[in-house]
């Protein structure tokens, strides 16, 4: 934030910067779709150049982020990402976790806090808020949060990626020598992967739409949306792709306890104004979650890093 060019980078969108490069339109479109979409889960006009640079740098560059071999796309959780939380939870003493009990109000004084849930209250010397900013901003705080924290939470909306799964009797694309991985400069889907779980009876192609394409699909009726996605898969993988046994479009924007996909991002102009308080505690309230991570911001790794950092803050303050 102290760099002189940070202000100018925060005031320009990634789309503006792409236009300034003078690169051919096709190259700009593809880079915009892959970086602003595939990484920041929006469109190039939605994020500042500074937010884009921070996000890419936090993971060590576009190579580690977009790469399969040795990169972020190489591995997946067998059984789904929920396994990570389940395995961590299994190490905790019985009764530590209280599930199905969302916090709705946080009261605090300089050295203590009380959180309210539909089932009662809990008192604590410190509270770590490890929810996405879009959800933290919906809680009721008493007293109201300081202006910079309140403003920050208003300026970090969640990504808007739309995820689809097409399920087939067999992975027909492999027989044609295709991996199932595609990156498209045109069409509704920017990315596809072979998402077939190991040993599964059926095969899965998973696709993502971002930015303007995701907005277009959201405006369509379910039937038209399905047709648009399957037409794109057919263009990529042949006619069999148009006839899945099952089709699922899951919109995380409408998921109450997530409200977006993949993670939250500061809007243009917000890094240099509200960003400096991103990890700053408010009395006994500490802030965690992947959006507060220095490394692998937006990813599971970043969420874990933020947990260690917040725990260390709490330990020191006590
Ligand atoms: C479709 C999709 C695909 C993704 N793919 C990848 C990937 O391949 N690799 C990767 O590294 N990351 C991926 N991510 C990002 C990854 O999910 C996040 O980085 C990670 O989950 C962030 O963890 P977190 O603990 O910060 O927040 P969350 O995982 O959002 O956890 C917050 C928790 O708080 C709970 N909660 C919310 N409100 C309240 C409340 N009021 N009271 C109590 N509890 C509450 C929620 O139910 C949730 O369990 C993906 C995200 C999505 C949506």
Image (cartoon, grey):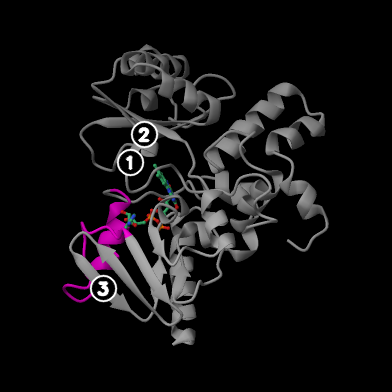
Indicate which disc residue 122 carries.
Answer: 3
Would you say the residues marked 2 and 3 are in contact, meaning their CB atoms lie under 8 Å apart?
A: no
Q: Depth-wise, is mark 2 or mark 3 nearer the camera? A: 3
Residue 236 horizontal/vertical position (percent)? 47, 19
Q: Is residue 100 magenta?
A: yes
The residue under the point 44% across, 42% down is 261
User: Can you see residue 26?
Assistant: yes
Residue 217 horizontal/vertical position (percent)? 43, 21
**Which element is circle 3 on?**
strand
Indicate which disc residue 255 carries.
Answer: 1
Residue 295 horizontal/vertical position (percent)? 56, 62
Would you say the residues marked 2 and 1 are in contact, meaning their CB atoms lie under 8 Å apart?
A: yes
**Which element is circle 1 on?**
loop
**The magenta stretch spans which residues?**
80-104
Q: Is residue 119 magenta?
A: no
Left or right: where does residue 244 sit relative to residue 218? Answer: left
The residue under the point 73% across, 61% down is 1
């Amino acid at each position: 934030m102290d760099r002189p060019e940070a202000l100018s980078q925060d005031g320009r969108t990634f789309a503006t910067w792409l236009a300034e490069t003078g690169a051919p339109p096709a190259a700009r479109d593809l880079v915009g779709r892959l970086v602003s979409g595939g990484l920041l889960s929006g469109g190039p006009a939605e994020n500042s150049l500074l937010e884009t640079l921070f996000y890419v740098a936090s993971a060590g560059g576009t190579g580690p982020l977009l790469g399969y071999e040795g990169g972020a796309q190489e591995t997946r959780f067998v059984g789904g990402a929920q396994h990570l939380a389940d395995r961590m939870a299994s190490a905790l003493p019985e009764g530590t976790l209280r599930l199905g009990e969302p916090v709705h109000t946080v009261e605090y004084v300089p050295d203590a806090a009380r959180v309210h849930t539909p089932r009662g209250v809990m008192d604590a010397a410190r509270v770590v808020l490890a929810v996405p900013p879009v959800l933290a901003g919906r809680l009721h705080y008493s007293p109201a949060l300081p202006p910079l924290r309140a403003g920050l939470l208003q300026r970090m909306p969640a990504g808007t990626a739309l995820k689809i799964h097409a399920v087939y009797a067999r992975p027909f694309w492999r027989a044609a020598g295709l991996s199932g991985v595609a990156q498209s400069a045109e069409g509704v889907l920017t990315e596809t992967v072979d998402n077939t779980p190991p040993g599964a009876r059926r095969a899965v192609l998973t696709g993502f739409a971002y930015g303007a394409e995701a907005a277009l699909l959201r405006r369509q009726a379910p039937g038209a949306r399905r047709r648009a996605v399957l037409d794109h898969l057919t263009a990529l993988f042949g006619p069999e792709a148009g006839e899945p046994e099952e089709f699922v479009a899951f919109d995380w924007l409408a998921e109450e306890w997530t409200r977006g996909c993949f993670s939250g991002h500061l809007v243009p102009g917000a890094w240099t104004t509200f960003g400096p308080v991103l990890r700053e505690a408010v009395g006994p309230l500490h802030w965690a979650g992947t959006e507060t991570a220095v490394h692998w911001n937006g990813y599971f790794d970043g969420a874990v890093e933020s947990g260690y950092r917040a725990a260390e803050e709490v330990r020191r303050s006590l």
